[in-house]
Image: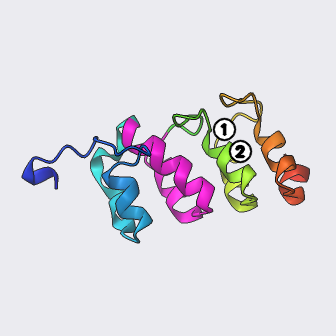
Amino acid sequence: MRTSGADINMTNDPGENAVSLATSCGHHEMVDMPPLRRAHHITKSLVSFAAEGRLDDVEKLLRQGCDVNMHDSTGDSPLMAAARNGHLSVVKVLRSSGAELNFTNKEGSTPLIAATENGNMDTVEYL
C-alpha cells in the first residue's frame, strides 16, 4: 500500500487505520511494519490489541518502543482496555512496562474502575 502512494495514516469513521484493519483480519505481520513507530498507527493498534487480549502483539509493539501510556480518541489507555476486558496477562505486561495505574479516560474511569465495573475480579485483585 505504501509503495502505491496510499495514505496509511487515514482512518475511517470508527477511527480504524490500515494497520488496525489488517491486523483485525488476521494479518499480524502488519505489526512488524516500520511505520508503526508513528503514534497514529500504534495508538489504535496497541489499545485494540490490549482490548482483545493479544499478548504477543502487545509485547511486540512495546519492544518496538511504543508508549505504554498512550491513549486512543476516547482516552482509553492500553491498560484501561485490557483491564476492562479481563485480560490479566496483558495487564501484567503493561504494568511491568510502566503503564500508569491511575490514568483516567475521558469519562474519569481508571483501569481499576473499568475492571471492577466489568466483574474482572482477578484483574481487580492484581491492580
In the rendered image, the quadrant that contains the N terminus is bottom left
Q: Residue at x 36, y 69 (%)?
A: 27
Q: Can you say whether 73 is above or below 56 in the image? A: above
Q: Mark 2 and mark 1 in contact? Answer it, CB < 8 Å.
A: yes
Q: Which residue is at the far left?
A: 4
The picture places residue 35, in percent across and down from the top left corner, at 28, 45
Q: Is 73 one of the magenta-colored residues?
A: no
Q: Secondary structure at mark 1?
A: loop
Q: Secondary structure at mark 2?
A: helix
Three-letter code, disc 1: Gly
Q: Residue at x 62, y 39 (%)?
A: 77
Q: Is residue 65 visible?
A: no
Q: Is residue 112 rendered to the left or right of residue 125?
A: left
The picture places residue 42, in percent across and down from the top left corner, at 43, 44
Q: What's the mark number on residue 77? A: none
Q: Is residue 94 rendered to the left or right of residue 30?
A: right
Three-letter code, disc 2: Arg
Q: Can you say whether 83 is above or below 122 in the image? A: above
Task: Name the residue beneath numbered marker 1.
Answer: 98
Q: Could you say which quadrant of the image residue 109 lies in?
A: top right
Q: Residue at x 44, y 64 (%)?
A: 24
Segment tinted magenta in the rendering: 40-66
Q: What's the mark number on residue 95? A: 2
